Amino acid sequence: MEIKAIRDKLQSIGQGSALRFWDRLDEAGRGRLGRQLQLLDLTSIAQLVQTQVKTKPKLELPREIQPARAYPRDPKPEDRALYRQAEQRGMELLRGGKVGAFLVAGGQGTRLGYDGPKGEFPVTPIRNKPLFQVFAEQLAAWSQLVGKTIPWYIMTSDINDGPTRAFFQKHGHFGYDSSAIFFFQQGMMPAFAADGQMLLAEESSLALSPDGHGGSLGALARSGALADMKRRGIEQLSYFQVDNPMVQCIDPLFLGLHDLVGSEMSSKTIPKADALEKVGNFVLADGVLQVIEYSDLPESLAKQTDEQGKLRFNAGSIAIHALKVGFIERLNEGGRLNLPWHRAEKKVPYVDQEGRTIKPDKPNAIKLEQFVFDAIPLANNPMVYTTERSEEFSPVKNADGNDSPHTSRRDQVLRAIRWLKEAGVEVQEGAMVEISPSFAVRADRLAGRTLPRRIVAGESVYLE
């Protein structure tokens, strides 16, 4: 689109001030701002300003909120045949090349004290492997098990796309087939002033931020990733986020159950650590499965207990999903991702009318995001499956305290020790163990491996 057309469109929606410094920009600056504006759906921006920015939507909770029903990790006697069939079906999908892995990796390691993509952060207890390597080794192990390379779709962001690609290149894609890796960028959204004007971070740049993990489903369509999946014959996606090194990138039982029950979007849940843990809550809202954010669920409901004294609303969301490719296509019909937007008031540095940089000391801007779990109520037969925190959830979000590198490494060691003990290995307290995915991707895969008989306190053992 030529700049005149962009200028005319901006004027028509009352956003002409985005180009107020245009005449004094050099060629590089004009190119930068022009590209940013070209990538925006300006018609959608105009609508969002009216419905989400100038007006603060009122949060309306559903009339009736009930606990969600979830398949248990260990099947009830009447479901054992279904679970066996699901495991078989998952393996069939994998062997048939019907499954792709989808990693959401647009974040930076800033909160961890790391200057670079979060996926580069070293996270394993002995070898200090980066998160990207942990996932690559898992996917390579599963590819070998099923005799078919699993295509891997990696969503980056504007700020970390180049560094992420360079990191993979530098490390030889961690041994993964580079032709099976598809990098693409997340969409960006401008921050808005209270009057609805798009803010400029610099004279030659909008104040942009990622459009939320829900925007990943739109980015799949825009980037050509969906078309690539169709070409490869992929029918299902295994979705996971970059900050959780204990995630099972591929879970045949979960994928098979998702497929057998005819679900378009399935999710994993864990029992919450406490009533107010900062995770979303799977609920039945007016009879429809959905996630209510921890900040939106009334505390009176969050703390409700049943006759046994257990939390009624105890199904925490951990951002692990299975999605049918056809469902993602449907969500993108009409060339726009059909998910709701969420409004957040944030502190955003900007340049004023004279070009001076202003760093506010209180929230001054509205950011808009889409959440992936908002797709759940739109899916046919959405399903929830229960996993264990100790098996599959120990993210690295904070530099210290809960959900830190320290707690994640601790949990990785505890899981490895538990796997070895289940296989008959004596492991003394104080031992350090790391199991490479190339050695075993889950506990039952230790069967037939040559294992140490005993690991003593103070010993560090790496198995690959």
Image: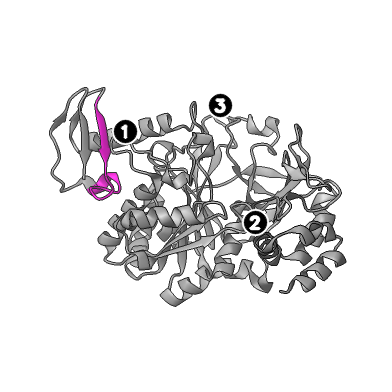
| Quarter in which the N terminus is drawn | bottom right
Task: Give the x, y percent position of residue 311.
Answer: 57, 32
Could you tell whether 176 is left or right of 182 in the image?
left
Q: Earlier in the sequence, mark 1 or mark 3?
A: 3
The residue range painted magenta reads 431-445
231 over 220 or under it: above or below: below
Q: Residue at coordinates 23% horizontally, 48% vertically from top-left?
A: 439
SS for dot 3: loop
From the viewer's perspective, is the residue at label 2 or at label 1 nearer? 2
From the viewer's perspective, is the residue at label 1 or at label 3 nearer? 1
Can you name the residue that lies furthest to the bottom here?
231
38 over 162 or under it: above or below: below
Q: Amino acid at mark 1?
A: Val
Could you tell whether 407 is left or right of 39 in the image?
left
Task: Give the x, y percent position of residue 192.
Answer: 78, 50
| Residue bearing the label numbered 3 | 309
| Residue bearing the label numbered 2 | 188
53 over 98 or under it: above or below: above
Instruction: Tell me the crowding category of disc 3: few under 14, some 14 to 19, or many 20 or more residues within 10 angstroms, Cα based.
Output: few
Q: Residue at coordinates 59% horizontally, 68% vertically from top-left?
A: 222
Q: Which mark is residue 413?
A: 1
Q: Amino acid at mark 2?
A: Met
Q: Amino acid at mark 3?
A: Gly
Q: Earlier in the sequence, mark 2 or mark 1?
A: 2
Task: Give the x, y percent position of residue 459.
Answer: 20, 27
Q: CA distance from mark 1 to mark 3?
A: 32 Å
Q: CA distance from mark 2 to mark 1?
A: 38 Å
The one of 386 and 242 positioned closer to us in this rendering:
242
Q: Residue at coordinates 46% horizontally, 71% vertically from top-left?
A: 229
